[in-house]
Amino acid sequence: MDWLLIPFEVSFVQRALVAGVLVSVACALVGTWVVVRGMAFIGDAMSHGMLPGVALASLAGVNLVLGAAVSAGVMALGVTVLSRSRRLSQDTTIGLLFVGMLATGVIIVSHSRSFAVDLTGFLFGDVLAVGHGDLVVLALALAVVAAVSVLGYRSFVALSFDTRKAHSLGLRPGLANALLLTLVTLTIVASFRVVGTLLVFGLLIAPAAAALFWAKRIRTIMLVAALLGILATVAGLLVSWHWGTAAGASIAAGAVLLFFLSALLSFAQRRLSRRHPHPTTEVERSR
């Protein structure tokens, strides 16, 4: 059992574990809504849309998280405003902003070589370098995400499954959609320090998608997704310690592996119990 315990006796690995747990829970809460609503594309676009802000922040010598937050805010505002157009679908709007922001970031990066190391950390994360200040930021972000998720739960459910019913119940689906987009932005900005923008998407989507194979209700999906995310974090840190791989990438790869494992086990279970009806899930009943 030494191979399992020794890595976590080191202080920076302990901080990485705490950071991974905080990110996993936040991503589980938000990622469930992203998966249920079919918002995976916007999650990917938001993670890449932070590149211009991070590049400019690095050139200006200011905090990269601040640059990421501003850039992600611009992206979210653009999606909200342009989505009101009846001539453009939301996917088209997100795609255009995604390409535009990413291209802008690459152009900025191509004119400077002074922040290559910081940019590598931005893209792939550096969970082993997480400090106490980063943990405070992650804890505060999780607290906000949890509070909004609890307070807006009824509105988010109605928005995800029946927008017209949400209107009739006076739940203001437009406001709920804006809040959900804000949660996605907050989670991605707070998490990229741990797993990087190219990998946070996997941690946001994979555990929640895997949980759909086993859970029947939204709250249960969130719980299972959080547990799977934590499992991926522990496994990723162990793999990184013993095999010298990138910690952030190992965590994200572990989350994706758990998804495919869940899909395989679920398929095998259905084959074995084909003659027995299965209770429908909260997601399935809405379809």
Image (cartoon, rainbow, N blue to C red):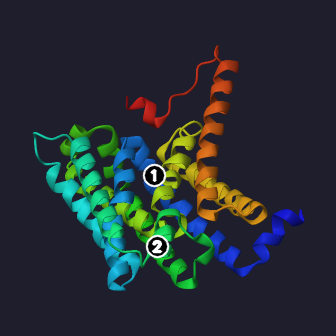
Secondary structure beneath disc 2?
Answer: helix
Secondary structure beneath disc 1?
Answer: helix
Could you tell me the amino acid type at mark 1?
A: Gly
The residue lying at 66 percent from left, 19 percent from top is 271
The picture places residue 89, in percent across and down from the top left corner, at 19, 40
The reply to whether dot 1 and dot 2 touch (C-beta < 8 Å) is no
Which circle marks residue 31 in the picture? 1
Which corner quadrant of the image does residue 51 belong to?
Answer: bottom left
Which quarter of the rendering shows the N terminus? Answer: bottom right
Which circle marks residue 258 in the picture? none
Which quarter of the rendering shows the C terminus? Answer: top left
The residue lying at 69 percent from left, 63 percent from top is 237
In front: 22, or 240?
A: 240
In front: 127, or 232?
A: 127
- How many other residues sit within 10 Å of disc 2, few (<14), some (14-19) or many (≥20)? few
Seen in the image, is 73 located left or right of residue 223?
left
Could you tell me the amino acid type at mark 2?
A: Ala
Q: How many marks?
A: 2
Which circle marks residue 116 in the picture? 2
- How many other residues sit within 10 Å of disc 1, few (<14), some (14-19) or many (≥20)? many
Real-space CA distance between mark 1 and mark 2, rounded to the nearest whole angstrom: 30 Å
